[in-house]
Amino acid sequence: MQTIERKRYLETLSVLKDKNLIKVATGVRRCGKSTLMTQFQDLLRKDNGKVSILAINMDMPDFRFLAEKNWKEIYDYIIKHLKKNVTNYVFIDEVQNVPEFEKLLEGLYVHPNIDLYVTGSNAFLLSSELATLLTGRAYEINVLPFSFAEYLEFTGKTTNPDRAFAEYVRTGGFPEAVRLSAEGNHFANEYLQMVFKNIYDNDISKRYTIYAEESYQEVVNFLIDSVGSSVSAGNIAKVLTTNKKKIDNKTVSKYIDTLVEAYLFYKVNRYDIKGKQHLATLEKYYLVD
Protein backbone atom coordinates (compact mmCIF):
# COMPACT_ATOMS: atom_id res chain seq x y z
CA MET A 1 0.00 0.00 0.00
CA GLN A 2 1.32 3.42 -0.96
CA THR A 3 2.45 5.62 1.93
CA ILE A 4 4.67 8.63 2.50
CA GLU A 5 6.80 9.48 5.50
CA ARG A 6 5.13 12.00 7.80
CA LYS A 7 8.49 13.72 8.22
CA ARG A 8 7.49 16.53 10.58
CA TYR A 9 5.84 14.18 13.06
CA LEU A 10 8.63 11.61 12.77
CA GLU A 11 11.22 14.28 13.57
CA THR A 12 9.27 15.22 16.71
CA LEU A 13 9.05 11.58 17.81
CA SER A 14 12.78 11.13 17.18
CA VAL A 15 13.61 14.13 19.38
CA LEU A 16 11.35 12.79 22.16
CA LYS A 17 12.66 9.21 21.99
CA ASP A 18 13.91 7.98 25.37
CA LYS A 19 12.74 11.17 27.05
CA ASN A 20 10.83 10.63 30.29
CA LEU A 21 7.48 11.50 28.71
CA ILE A 22 4.43 9.69 27.40
CA LYS A 23 4.28 10.49 23.70
CA VAL A 24 0.58 10.99 22.83
CA ALA A 25 -0.39 11.23 19.14
CA THR A 26 -3.88 12.71 18.95
CA GLY A 27 -6.11 13.60 16.03
CA VAL A 28 -9.24 12.73 14.10
CA ARG A 29 -9.82 9.09 13.17
CA ARG A 30 -8.23 7.89 9.90
CA CYS A 31 -5.77 10.78 9.65
CA GLY A 32 -2.77 8.44 9.77
CA LYS A 33 -1.79 8.14 13.45
CA SER A 34 -1.37 4.35 13.34
CA THR A 35 0.66 4.55 10.14
CA LEU A 36 2.83 7.23 11.73
CA MET A 37 3.58 4.98 14.70
CA THR A 38 4.39 2.08 12.36
CA GLN A 39 6.79 4.33 10.46
CA PHE A 40 8.48 5.33 13.71
CA GLN A 41 8.81 1.67 14.71
CA ASP A 42 10.55 1.05 11.36
CA LEU A 43 12.97 3.88 12.17
CA LEU A 44 13.73 2.32 15.55
CA ARG A 45 14.47 -1.01 13.89
CA LYS A 46 16.66 0.70 11.30
CA ASP A 47 18.74 2.26 14.10
CA ASN A 48 18.92 -0.97 16.12
CA GLY A 49 18.07 -4.35 14.64
CA LYS A 50 17.64 -5.86 18.11
CA VAL A 51 15.34 -3.15 19.49
CA SER A 52 12.48 -4.35 21.70
CA ILE A 53 9.10 -3.12 20.41
CA LEU A 54 5.66 -4.11 21.69
CA ALA A 55 2.88 -2.61 19.55
CA ILE A 56 -0.74 -3.20 20.59
CA ASN A 57 -3.62 -2.40 18.25
CA MET A 58 -6.82 -3.94 19.55
CA ASP A 59 -8.43 -3.71 16.11
CA MET A 60 -5.90 -6.28 14.90
CA PRO A 61 -6.87 -9.98 15.25
CA ASP A 62 -3.72 -10.74 17.27
CA PHE A 63 -4.79 -8.38 20.05
CA ARG A 64 -8.58 -8.51 19.85
CA PHE A 65 -8.68 -10.69 22.96
CA LEU A 66 -7.37 -7.70 24.96
CA ALA A 67 -10.37 -5.56 24.00
CA GLU A 68 -12.52 -7.20 26.69
CA LYS A 69 -9.84 -7.00 29.39
CA ASN A 70 -9.62 -4.40 32.14
CA TRP A 71 -6.66 -2.04 32.41
CA LYS A 72 -4.83 -4.21 34.98
CA GLU A 73 -5.04 -7.31 32.78
CA ILE A 74 -3.66 -5.34 29.84
CA TYR A 75 -0.92 -3.93 32.08
CA ASP A 76 0.02 -7.44 33.24
CA TYR A 77 0.09 -8.67 29.63
CA ILE A 78 2.48 -5.87 28.62
CA ILE A 79 4.79 -6.39 31.63
CA LYS A 80 4.89 -10.13 30.92
CA HIS A 81 6.13 -9.51 27.36
CA LEU A 82 8.87 -7.00 28.19
CA LYS A 83 12.53 -7.84 27.69
CA LYS A 84 14.73 -7.42 30.74
CA ASN A 85 17.59 -4.94 31.11
CA VAL A 86 16.77 -3.03 27.88
CA THR A 87 14.46 -0.18 26.91
CA ASN A 88 11.14 -1.53 25.65
CA TYR A 89 9.27 0.73 23.23
CA VAL A 90 5.58 0.18 23.96
CA PHE A 91 2.92 1.42 21.51
CA ILE A 92 -0.83 1.35 22.27
CA ASP A 93 -3.25 2.35 19.52
CA GLU A 94 -6.53 4.14 20.41
CA VAL A 95 -5.82 3.88 24.12
CA GLN A 96 -9.05 5.71 25.05
CA ASN A 97 -10.90 2.44 24.28
CA VAL A 98 -9.30 0.81 27.35
CA PRO A 99 -11.52 1.20 30.46
CA GLU A 100 -9.71 3.38 33.03
CA PHE A 101 -6.88 3.85 30.53
CA GLU A 102 -5.33 6.59 32.69
CA LYS A 103 -4.39 3.96 35.31
CA LEU A 104 -2.78 1.87 32.57
CA LEU A 105 -0.75 4.83 31.33
CA GLU A 106 0.35 5.84 34.81
CA GLY A 107 1.46 2.29 35.62
CA LEU A 108 3.45 1.92 32.39
CA TYR A 109 4.95 5.41 32.70
CA VAL A 110 6.62 4.68 36.03
CA HIS A 111 8.13 1.40 34.79
CA PRO A 112 11.90 2.00 34.38
CA ASN A 113 12.28 -0.07 31.18
CA ILE A 114 9.42 1.40 29.14
CA ASP A 115 9.36 4.25 26.63
CA LEU A 116 5.63 4.76 26.03
CA TYR A 117 3.79 5.88 22.88
CA VAL A 118 -0.01 6.02 22.53
CA THR A 119 -2.58 7.28 20.04
CA GLY A 120 -6.07 8.61 20.68
CA SER A 121 -8.98 9.95 18.65
CA ASN A 122 -10.78 11.93 21.31
CA ALA A 123 -9.70 14.97 23.30
CA PHE A 124 -11.04 13.17 26.40
CA LEU A 125 -7.61 11.54 26.31
CA LEU A 126 -6.12 14.82 27.49
CA SER A 127 -9.11 16.09 29.44
CA SER A 128 -8.57 18.10 32.59
CA GLU A 129 -8.77 14.97 34.77
CA LEU A 130 -6.10 13.09 32.85
CA ALA A 131 -4.02 16.20 32.23
CA THR A 132 -3.89 16.73 35.99
CA LEU A 133 -2.89 13.11 36.55
CA LEU A 134 -0.16 13.28 33.90
CA THR A 135 0.99 16.88 34.38
CA GLY A 136 4.52 17.17 33.06
CA ARG A 137 4.44 13.53 31.93
CA ALA A 138 2.63 13.63 28.58
CA TYR A 139 3.63 15.37 25.34
CA GLU A 140 0.83 15.76 22.79
CA ILE A 141 1.54 15.52 19.08
CA ASN A 142 -1.56 16.61 17.18
CA VAL A 143 -1.68 14.73 13.86
CA LEU A 144 -3.67 16.17 10.96
CA PRO A 145 -4.60 14.76 7.54
CA PHE A 146 -2.19 15.45 4.68
CA SER A 147 -1.01 19.01 4.19
CA PHE A 148 -0.89 20.20 0.57
CA ALA A 149 2.86 19.49 0.45
CA GLU A 150 2.21 15.92 1.66
CA TYR A 151 -0.66 15.59 -0.83
CA LEU A 152 1.71 16.51 -3.68
CA GLU A 153 4.31 14.02 -2.46
CA PHE A 154 1.68 11.29 -2.10
CA THR A 155 0.04 11.82 -5.50
CA GLY A 156 3.06 12.99 -7.50
CA LYS A 157 0.93 15.76 -9.04
CA THR A 158 3.70 18.35 -9.03
CA THR A 159 3.65 19.53 -12.66
CA ASN A 160 0.50 21.64 -12.28
CA PRO A 161 0.25 22.85 -8.64
CA ASP A 162 -2.79 25.07 -9.27
CA ARG A 163 -4.83 22.18 -10.63
CA ALA A 164 -3.52 19.89 -7.88
CA PHE A 165 -4.57 22.42 -5.23
CA ALA A 166 -8.10 22.59 -6.66
CA GLU A 167 -8.28 18.78 -6.43
CA TYR A 168 -6.83 18.86 -2.90
CA VAL A 169 -9.48 21.34 -1.77
CA ARG A 170 -12.17 19.11 -3.26
CA THR A 171 -10.83 15.80 -1.89
CA GLY A 172 -9.13 16.84 1.36
CA GLY A 173 -6.16 15.21 2.99
CA PHE A 174 -7.45 11.97 4.54
CA PRO A 175 -4.98 9.43 3.10
CA GLU A 176 -7.60 6.86 2.07
CA ALA A 177 -9.82 9.54 0.51
CA VAL A 178 -6.87 10.70 -1.58
CA ARG A 179 -6.27 7.12 -2.73
CA LEU A 180 -9.93 6.64 -3.62
CA SER A 181 -10.16 9.96 -5.48
CA ALA A 182 -8.03 8.41 -8.23
CA GLU A 183 -11.05 6.16 -8.97
CA GLY A 184 -13.52 9.04 -8.92
CA ASN A 185 -14.55 11.73 -6.45
CA HIS A 186 -17.77 9.96 -5.48
CA PHE A 187 -15.70 7.16 -3.92
CA ALA A 188 -13.77 9.69 -1.82
CA ASN A 189 -16.99 11.50 -0.81
CA GLU A 190 -18.69 8.28 0.26
CA TYR A 191 -15.61 7.31 2.23
CA LEU A 192 -15.55 10.66 4.06
CA GLN A 193 -19.22 10.28 4.98
CA MET A 194 -18.38 6.82 6.33
CA VAL A 195 -15.51 8.32 8.38
CA PHE A 196 -17.88 10.91 9.89
CA LYS A 197 -20.42 8.19 10.76
CA ASN A 198 -17.66 6.12 12.35
CA ILE A 199 -16.53 9.09 14.46
CA TYR A 200 -20.13 9.87 15.43
CA ASP A 201 -20.87 6.24 16.38
CA ASN A 202 -17.60 5.57 18.27
CA ASP A 203 -16.39 8.88 19.68
CA ILE A 204 -19.56 10.92 20.13
CA SER A 205 -22.84 9.03 20.57
CA LYS A 206 -21.29 6.36 22.83
CA ARG A 207 -19.82 8.99 25.15
CA TYR A 208 -22.47 11.71 25.12
CA THR A 209 -26.24 11.93 25.15
CA ILE A 210 -27.42 13.23 21.76
CA TYR A 211 -31.07 14.19 22.12
CA ALA A 212 -31.86 14.52 18.42
CA GLU A 213 -29.55 13.34 15.63
CA GLU A 214 -31.28 15.58 13.08
CA SER A 215 -30.64 18.69 15.18
CA TYR A 216 -27.05 17.53 15.74
CA GLN A 217 -26.52 17.30 11.99
CA GLU A 218 -28.02 20.78 11.59
CA VAL A 219 -25.40 22.15 14.01
CA VAL A 220 -22.66 20.39 12.03
CA ASN A 221 -23.97 21.85 8.76
CA PHE A 222 -24.21 25.32 10.28
CA LEU A 223 -20.59 25.22 11.44
CA ILE A 224 -19.44 23.99 8.01
CA ASP A 225 -21.32 26.83 6.29
CA SER A 226 -19.85 29.33 8.78
CA VAL A 227 -16.16 28.32 8.58
CA GLY A 228 -14.07 31.47 9.04
CA SER A 229 -16.98 33.45 10.47
CA SER A 230 -17.58 34.33 14.11
CA VAL A 231 -20.37 32.22 15.61
CA SER A 232 -21.96 31.66 19.01
CA ALA A 233 -24.18 28.92 20.39
CA GLY A 234 -26.93 31.49 20.93
CA ASN A 235 -26.87 32.62 17.31
CA ILE A 236 -26.94 29.04 16.02
CA ALA A 237 -29.86 28.15 18.32
CA LYS A 238 -31.74 31.25 17.17
CA VAL A 239 -31.26 30.48 13.46
CA LEU A 240 -32.21 26.81 13.81
CA THR A 241 -35.28 27.64 15.93
CA THR A 242 -36.37 30.17 13.28
CA ASN A 243 -36.08 27.33 10.75
CA LYS A 244 -38.37 25.20 12.92
CA LYS A 245 -35.54 23.16 14.46
CA LYS A 246 -36.20 24.06 18.09
CA ILE A 247 -33.01 23.84 20.14
CA ASP A 248 -31.55 25.84 23.04
CA ASN A 249 -28.09 27.37 23.20
CA LYS A 250 -26.89 25.01 25.98
CA THR A 251 -27.60 22.01 23.75
CA VAL A 252 -25.87 23.68 20.80
CA SER A 253 -22.85 24.43 22.99
CA LYS A 254 -22.71 20.81 24.14
CA TYR A 255 -22.94 19.54 20.55
CA ILE A 256 -20.10 21.84 19.47
CA ASP A 257 -17.95 20.62 22.36
CA THR A 258 -18.39 17.01 21.20
CA LEU A 259 -17.28 17.96 17.66
CA VAL A 260 -14.17 19.70 19.00
CA GLU A 261 -13.35 16.80 21.32
CA ALA A 262 -13.55 14.38 18.36
CA TYR A 263 -11.08 16.63 16.47
CA LEU A 264 -13.61 17.27 13.69
CA PHE A 265 -13.49 21.02 14.34
CA TYR A 266 -10.84 23.26 15.87
CA LYS A 267 -11.88 26.32 17.86
CA VAL A 268 -10.17 29.70 17.56
CA ASN A 269 -11.00 32.15 20.36
CA ARG A 270 -11.42 35.90 19.91
CA TYR A 271 -8.53 37.88 21.33
CA ASP A 272 -8.91 41.28 22.94
CA ILE A 273 -5.78 43.20 21.91
CA LYS A 274 -6.29 45.92 24.51
CA GLY A 275 -7.06 43.60 27.40
CA LYS A 276 -4.63 40.96 26.12
CA GLN A 277 -7.00 38.13 26.92
CA HIS A 278 -9.21 35.63 25.14
CA LEU A 279 -12.91 36.50 24.99
CA ALA A 280 -15.56 33.92 25.77
CA THR A 281 -17.96 34.75 22.92
CA LEU A 282 -18.06 34.62 19.12
CA GLU A 283 -15.40 32.02 18.41
CA LYS A 284 -14.48 30.72 14.97
CA TYR A 285 -14.50 27.03 14.11
CA TYR A 286 -12.47 25.37 11.37
CA LEU A 287 -12.90 21.88 9.94
CA VAL A 288 -10.03 19.46 10.51
CA ASP A 289 -9.85 18.85 6.76
Image: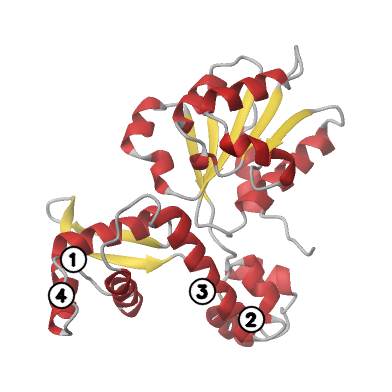
* Whether residue 289 is visible: no
Q: Which residue is disc 1 drawn over?
A: 233
| Quarter of the view holding residue 108 | top right
Q: Earlier in the sequence, mark 3 or mark 2?
A: 2
Q: Residue at x 27, y 74 (%)?
A: 229
Q: Earlier in the sequence, mark 3 or mark 4?
A: 3
Q: Residue at x 43, y 41 (%)?
A: 125
Q: Nearer the viewer, residue 164 or 265?
A: 265
Residue 278 in the image: x percent, y percent? 20, 52
Q: Which residue is disc 3 drawn over?
A: 193
Q: Nearer the viewer, mark 3 or mark 4?
A: 4
Q: Which mark is residue 246?
A: 4
Question: Which amino acid lies under the numbered mark 3 shown in the image of this protein?
Answer: Gln
Q: Earlier in the sequence, mark 3 or mark 1?
A: 3
Question: Which amino acid lies under the numbered mark 2 shown in the image of this protein?
Answer: Phe
Question: Which amino acid lies under the numbered mark 1 shown in the image of this protein?
Answer: Ala
Q: Nearer the viewer, mark 1 or mark 4?
A: 4
- Name the colour scheme: secondary structure
Q: Find the distance from the CA under tag 4 to the CA under tag 2.
A: 34 Å
Residue 272 in the image: x percent, y percent? 16, 57
Q: Residue at x 15, y 75 (%)?
A: 246
| Quarter of the view holding residue 172 | bottom right
Question: Which amino acid lies under the numbered mark 4 shown in the image of this protein?
Answer: Lys
Q: Find the distance from the CA under tag 1 to the CA under tag 4.
A: 13 Å
* Image marks 4 and 2: residues in contact by CB distance under 8 Å: no
Q: Find the distance from the CA under tag 3 to the CA under tag 4.
A: 25 Å
Q: Which mark is residue 187?
A: 2
Of helix, strand and loop, which one carries label 4?
loop
